[in-house]
Image (cartoon, rainbow, N blue to C red):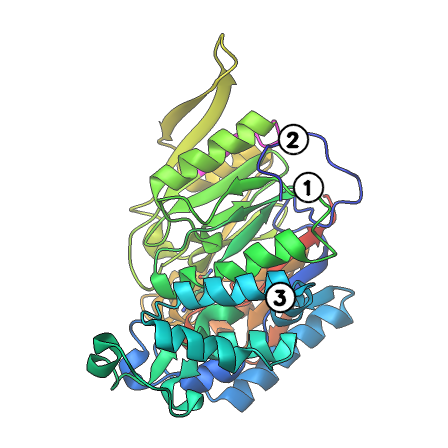
Amino acid sequence: MATVLQTTRAASSPLHVTSEIGRLRTVLLHRPGAELENLTPDLLERLLFDDIPYLQLAQSEHDSFAQVLTANGVEVLYLENLAAESLTDAHIRDNLIRQFILEAGVESDCMKAALIEYFRPLSNRDLIDQMMAGVRRDQLGNVRVDSLYDRVNNSYPFLCDPMPNLYFTRDPFATIGQGITLNHMRTLTRNRETLFAQYIFQYHPRFRQADIPLWFDREEATALEGGDELVLSDQVLAIGISQRTDSGSVERVCRRLFEAEAGFETVLAFHIPQSRAFMHLDTVFTMVDHDKFTIHSAIEGPLTVYEITGSRDRAGQVRLKIEQLNDKLEAILEKYLKRRVTLIRCGSGDAIHAPREQWNDGANTLAIAPGEVVVYSRNHVTNQLLESHGIKLHVIPSSELSRGRGGPRCMSMPLYRDDL
Ligand SMILES: NC(=O)NCCC[C@H](N)C(=O)O
């Protein structure tokens, strides 16, 4: 990955996203795995789940999602495959194991050594699956415990926690233009997920030569999550300031994009209420067509939008100009997209249907082309409204996947879209 930002990119860049709706060509998914079976009621809150999905059904729902995408010409890549294929030599593999153990919070030398031994014989793919699923203490057999720490903490079943949120590939990194933000996640549990992206972009043969600009790094001190990053056009981004993303991160992304002169001229920072239900901007607002968006009406009142632009001072340094916009959201979007826009309200804006369907990601659509989106079956009120606005729907089953609080957009990271 490039740490020095450059403006010119090879035409053959493996990453290219200049809108939310351009025809989707390549997307990254993660098929839910054993990590979901390692959820227990005690772990739910810390691991950011609201219930325990039935794995077999979650996998079959996820396969339906992948099938819709492939049937529509989208190349589907899986995080677990890319991560395994990134381990192209023993040194890279050993480093990943060491870093994984460190970030899993394994404290004692004897447990670290036992884990390294446990991982040693596994194939690359089994290693990645095991890291994702988590490692229980009793998987390691009889380890000679020589630390006080292990004697005091031996009742907790996991040495390395499972990572059940991995199927929300939208969040740990995000494609913007031909670069990425490699994110620093708000929570420890999700921050561990970004390690896989780091290895993929650094070592995977598909990406390692590509000199991919890094608009944000996982080592930064403030939080940024991909669900807050929307590419409205090749010139305008929307970034949520939310429960998961700090304003300082938005400023840093702006500075890097403007310094690189990557084509993006304006960032609209959407300050949304902080709540579990609206954890990211894309839980309340997604783009479905050139001129149509879903929106959850509960954020419209409290929403504040800031326009951020940049210019260079005499020394060539980028200075940010930040202005609060007082217009209604439609007017703001119309100004930047240069066309009339329609906001389609989740659950019709109804007092009961809207919060119920938003909770199950009714507003969280994945566009695979302009006016063509993937949605969850359970959000029938919103879905009908989308259809009445001429949007083509690809409806996928949703009883288990939705228990993790994410919809089709959250479950996908576009790597390549056609330009509009
Ligand atoms: N972009 C998104 O809204 N992603 C959904 C993430 C859900 C996950 N359980 C979380 O709390 O982070």
Q: Amino acid at mark 2?
A: Gln
Residue 56 locus on image (x, y percent): 55, 90
Q: Quadrant of ligand 1?
A: bottom left
Disc 3 element: helix
Q: Quadrant of residue 93?
A: bottom right
Say if residue 283 shows up in the picture: yes
Q: Residue 331 location in percent, x, y?
A: 47, 35
> Does ligand 1 reach within 8 Å of label 1's beta carbon?
no
User: In the rendered image of this protein, does residue 206 appear above or below residue 1?
Assistant: below
Which amino acid is tagged 3?
Ala
Q: Measure the C-alpha gap from mark 3 to mark 1.
A: 18 Å
Report the magenta residues as a range.
261-268
Disc sitting over residue 6 in the figure: 2
How many labels, in total? 3
Q: Which label lies toward us, 3 or 2? A: 3
Whether 266 is among the magenta residues is: yes
For badge 1, the amino acid type reads: Asp
